[in-house]
Image (cartoon, rainbow, N blue to C red):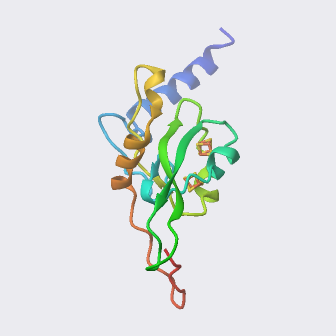
């Protein structure tokens, strides 16, 4: 009987909470719009990647797999020598291992990796969380436009 006041008080809290509106988003019936800079998924702009491997070396989880080969490209000026360039053969990110730290996006010196706020890519099979070059490239369509430059700022060279 000594527990009765506590029980009544607890039930009071339960009933009060039941009649309040839920503060959580009832996913997947309701969808919350993620913020523009949310870390949802990493997108690859393949044409910017020089296969420098910096992102794969810096990734703390070792979940970026890159393979490439060298090829000859036409000279920059007429009469010049053909240039040696790297081409991507494979670029995979394993989202089963990724911890969304963003180091790969930060260290890429050639603007080849971007954050997209897209987050709906769960899979029933863990192996399907390995996104290949094509899939990472498709995420580029979901990368938001960068915010306008602040007054007085100069656009960087691309
Ligand atoms: S976000 Fe972090 S853990 Fe994920 S791939 Fe990039 S560096 Fe690796
Ligand atoms: S750091 Fe950038 S350019 Fe270098 S391999 Fe990674 S994505 Fe490609």
Q: Is residue 58 left or right of residue 81?
A: right
Spot the residue most to the left: 29
Report whether residue 38 is seen: yes
Residue nearest the observer in this picture, 89 or 20:
89
Q: Position of residue 22 (x, y in %)?
A: 41, 38
Q: Quadrant of the N terminus?
A: top right
Q: Position of residue 103 (x, y in %)?
A: 64, 51
Q: Position of residue 55 (x, y in %)?
A: 62, 50
Say above or below: 37 vs 24.
Answer: below
Residue nearest the observer in this picture, 21 or 58:
58
Say above or below: 84 vs 5.
Answer: below
Say above or below: 98 vs 81.
Answer: above
For the point 42% across and 44% down, which residue is it? Answer: 136
- Residue 152 placement: quadrant: bottom right
Spot the residue most to the bottom: 152
Residue nearest the observer in this picture, 12 or 147:
147
Residue nearest the observer in this picture, 102 or 77:
77
Say above or below: 96 vs 87.
Answer: above
- Residue 45 placement: quadrant: bottom left
- Quadrant of ligand 2 in image: bottom right
For the point 55% across and 41% down, which residue is it? Answer: 67
For the point 53% across and 46% down, which residue is it? Answer: 69
For the point 67% across and 36% down, which residue is it? Answer: 61
């Amino acid at each position: 009987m000594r527990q009765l006041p506590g029980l009544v008080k607890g039930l009071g809290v339960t009933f009060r909470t039941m009649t309040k509106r839920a503060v959580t988003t009832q996913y997947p019936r309701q969808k919350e719009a993620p913020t523009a800079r949310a870390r949802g998924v990493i997108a690859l702009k393949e044409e910017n990647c020089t296969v420098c491997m910096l992102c794969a070396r810096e990734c703390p989880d070792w979940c970026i797999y890159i393979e490439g080969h060298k090829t000859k490209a036409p000279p920059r000026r007429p009469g010049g020598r053909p240039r040696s360039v790297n081409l991507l053969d494979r670029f995979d990110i394993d989202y089963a291992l990724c911890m969304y730290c963003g180091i790969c996006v930060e260290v890429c010196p050639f603007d080849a990796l971007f954050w997209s706020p897209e987050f709906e890519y769960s899979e029933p099979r863990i192996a399907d969380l390995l996104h290949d070059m094509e899939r990472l490239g498709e995420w580029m369509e979901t990368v938001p436009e960068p915010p306008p430059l602040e007054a007085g700022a100069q656009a960087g060279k691309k």
